[in-house]
Image: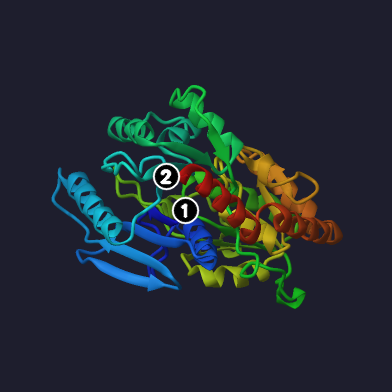
Amino acid sequence: MHICFLTNEFPKPGIAHGGVGTFIRNLSLELVKFDIKVSIVGTNYINVEEYENFQGINIYRTKKHNLKGLIWYNRAKSINQKIAEIHQKDPISIVEGTELALAFINKIPEVKYLIRMNGGHHFFSNAENKKTNPWKSIQEKLSFKKADHVISVSKYTAESTRDLLKLGDISIHIIPNPIDVDLFKPADPKAVVKNKLLFVGTICEKKGVRQLAMAMPKILQAFPDAQLEIVGRDWIDPNSDISFTEYLKTFITPESKDHITITGPVDLVKIPEKIASSEICVYPSHMEALPLAWLEVLASAKAFVGSISGPGPEVVKHGETGLLADCYDPDDIANHVIDLLGNKEKALELGRNARKDVLERFDVKVLVKKNIDYYRSIAS
């Protein structure tokens, strides 16, 4: 069997990437252990075509196109040419991508085309109460029309997208995102910095980092030595070129200023030590599809405060494996953090329960088998 993933986000040294890239990396590394061939096809960050074999995974990066107005056409042309070239040498069984990925893909008759929902344009536009971009809306609808099969990382994402795109009664298989429990695991308790809080994620509105910063004054009233580290890549508004990090700083009060550190992006391999040094991780996202960043914390047996919104309850069992706050309410976020900072044993118990739950439901070694069974069922 030969799986071809369509993504520009497969991790590349020195380049920030999102959760989809991490998911494909985790899954692909396990697939090749079962003698399943894996190819990654996506657009490069520079005007050069590149090939790399990473631990048995064949990664093809087509050169970046900059001709305004025709970028989408030239990118699609390059991607289609590369897929055809790969298929001719080593027949592809399944081509998989996210919600928009198949819009301009030329279908090969003997190949199955699969969309794996990770939260598409309609999904997040609706979550943020924004109007959909007409061009992206067309692409997403066209992409679903080309899909032979659909899978989703959470029930919430599946049913929300079904309603928004009027997909009717099509079958949507559910397999959660997997986590590498060997990379993210319990660390030496001595590494913990007392009353340190951690946020990891893109620094943007939908990740809830602004509300977290606004929660700090109340947290500091209860724990004056609390510190918050914010780790992640900045989001730049494409319409105004305004940095969200700079916007975020306007919500940091004078009394909080010396208690909040904005670190910026770090490599995936350094995230475990960031988690290890923290007492509590706080990721109050407004919406997620199924957040890998949450699973990284839970797998590390660390006390966690997430968001009640969207698929939050599918990932975190409130009061058992973590706490879920109202992501729009800084006071509620603060109350949950204060609760855990003031009850160390409760925090430790939640962390232990979280690790056990992840091993049962989200371990990549468990989920790779479910993915392989699903791939075989649709390829046949």
Q: Nearer the viewer, residue 80 or 242?
A: 80
Work out whether mark 1 precedes mark 2 in sequence or the reverse, and give the earlier one.
Answer: 1
Residue placed at 60% from the left, 50% from the top?
A: 370
Q: Nearer the viewer, residue 231 or 309?
A: 309
Residue 255 shows in this picture: no
| Residue with the mark numbered 1 | 20
- Residue furthest front as drawn: 380
In the rendered view, tell whether residue 153 sits above or below residue 48: above
Q: Quadrant of the N terminus?
A: bottom left
Foreground: 308 or 66?
A: 66
Q: Amino acid at mark 2?
A: Thr
Give x and y (percent) for residue 314. Answer: 67, 41
Q: Is residue 273 left or right of residue 47?
A: right
**Count of marks overlaid on the render:** 2
SS assignment at label 2? loop
Q: Secondary structure at mark 1?
A: helix
- The amino acid on which the numbered mark 1 sits, given as a three-letter code, is Val
Q: Name the residue beneath numbered marker 2.
A: 98
- The answer to whether 176 is drawn above or below residue 181 in the figure is above
Label 1 close to label 2 by CB (< 8 Å): yes
Residue 86, placed above or below residue 74: below
